[in-house]
Amino acid sequence: MSPSSTSPSRPTSLVTGASSGIGLAVARLLVERGHRVVGTSRDPDRLSAQDRVPGVEYRALDLDDLDAVGRFAAGLLADGVEVDVLVNNAGESQCGALEELPLPEVEHLFRVNVLGPVHLTQLLVPGMRERGRGRVVMVGSMLATFPLAYRSSYVATKAAIKGFAEAARFELSPHGVWLTTVEPGSVATGISGRRTVHSQESGPYAAGLRQMLHRLDAAERDGVSAARVAATVLRAVEADPPAPTYAVGSGAPAVHVLRRALPGSVVERVVARRFGLGQHGVRG
Ligand SMILES: NC(=O)c1ccc[n+]([C@@H]2O[C@H](COP(=O)([O-])OP(=O)(O)OC[C@H]3O[C@@H](n4cnc5c(N)ncnc54)[C@H](OP(=O)(O)O)[C@@H]3O)[C@@H](O)[C@H]2O)c1
C-alpha cells in the first residue's frame, strides 16, 4: 500500500518495536514513503534522539500485557488514528534446551511474540475490513522454516505467528486486507545481547547450547542490515497483492528452494553443521 497506488490518501502505518533494529528501519522507510507512522516502544520516554525517527509518533505498548494491548488499540481509536498498515515487528529472543525452559518464561515469550501481536491484529483488522483496505505484516523468522536446537520456544512462536497469518489471509483477502509474513535470517541488530538464555551450567545441554550460541552470535554479527529487511517489509506492504511469505538474509531465498528440494533429514544435518551441533544437537 503506497500513497499513489491502492490507497487514495496518505496511509497510516503502525510499527511495533520501532525503537530499535528492524522496527526502527521500517519506521524510517515508511516515513520516507510518505506514510503517517505511529511507532511503539515499551517506554517511549526513555528513547534518545538516536532511537527516534523524525516524523514518527511514538506510543507506549508492552505486548506482554494483553489488557494493555486492548487499551492501546482503544486509545488509537479514540484519537481517530485509522491504521491501514500494521507491522507486527516487536519481539523477544529466547534460548534454552526444552527440558530447562521455565514455563513462565515460555508463557511470557508467547504473549510477546504471538498473543500480543495476534490480539493487536484482532483489534485493528475490523477497521481495515470496513474501509476495504489494509496490510498486516508479521515479522517472523527463518528459524520457523529451519528449526534450530536450543531455540524451540522462539521457533514455536515464529511458526505460530506465521500460522495465524497464513490461515487468516484467506478470511481477510476478500475484504481487501492482506496478511503476510516476512522471515529474516540473521540480521545485525544487536538482538544477541538482548536474548534471554536459560541454561543449567553443569547440565547435560550446557556444551551444546554454548556451541550453538557462539555460532548464532557470529551469524548475527555478520547478518544483513536492518535496512535490507525493512526494504523487504516495504515490498510486502506495497505489493498488490503481497505474497504469503517473503524471506530475506542468510542465503534466502535460495536456501528455501533447497529446503523444498532436499529430504528433511539432509536439511536437519546442514543446519546442525552450520551451528556446530554435529555431536551435541543431533545424532550422527
Ligand atoms: N535480529 C535478527 O537476527 C532477527 C532474525 C529473525 C527475526 N527477527 C525478529 O525481528 C523482530 C525485531 O528484531 P530486532 O533484531 O530488530 O530486535 P531488537 O533490536 O531487539 O528490537 C526489538 C523491538 O521490540 C520491542 N520490544 C521488546 N520487547 C517488547 C515487549 N514486551 N512489548 C513490546 N515491544 C517490545 C523493543 O522496544 P522497547 O525495548 O523500546 O520496548 C524493540 O523496539 C523480532 O520479532 C525478532 O524476533 C530478528
Image (cartoon, helix red, strand yellow):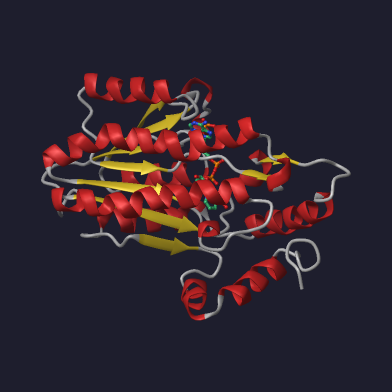
Determine which quarter of the picture holds residue 9.
Answer: top left
Q: Which residue occupies the foreground of this view, 48 or 128?
A: 128
Location of residue 23 in the rendering, given as x and y in whole percent from the top left corner:
45, 43
| Quarter of the figure that contains the C terminus | bottom right
Q: Residue at x 44, y 46 (%)?
A: 25
Q: Is residue 10 left or right of residue 50?
A: left
Nearer to me, 283 or 70: 283
Q: Quadrant of residue 239?
A: bottom left
Residue at x 40%, y 52% (from the top left corner): 163
- Give how far across and how far down residue 112 sits, in percent: 50, 35
> Residue 201 in the image: x percent, y percent?
85, 42
Which residue sits at x=62%, y=30%? 104
Please indicate whether residue 20 sits to the left or right of residue 284 in the image: left
Q: Does residue 130 appear in the picture of this structure? A: yes
- Answer whether residue 55 is visible to the viewer in this image: no
Q: On the picture, is 136 further left or further right than 49?
A: left
Q: Which residue is painted at 50% across and 30% down in the image?
A: 49
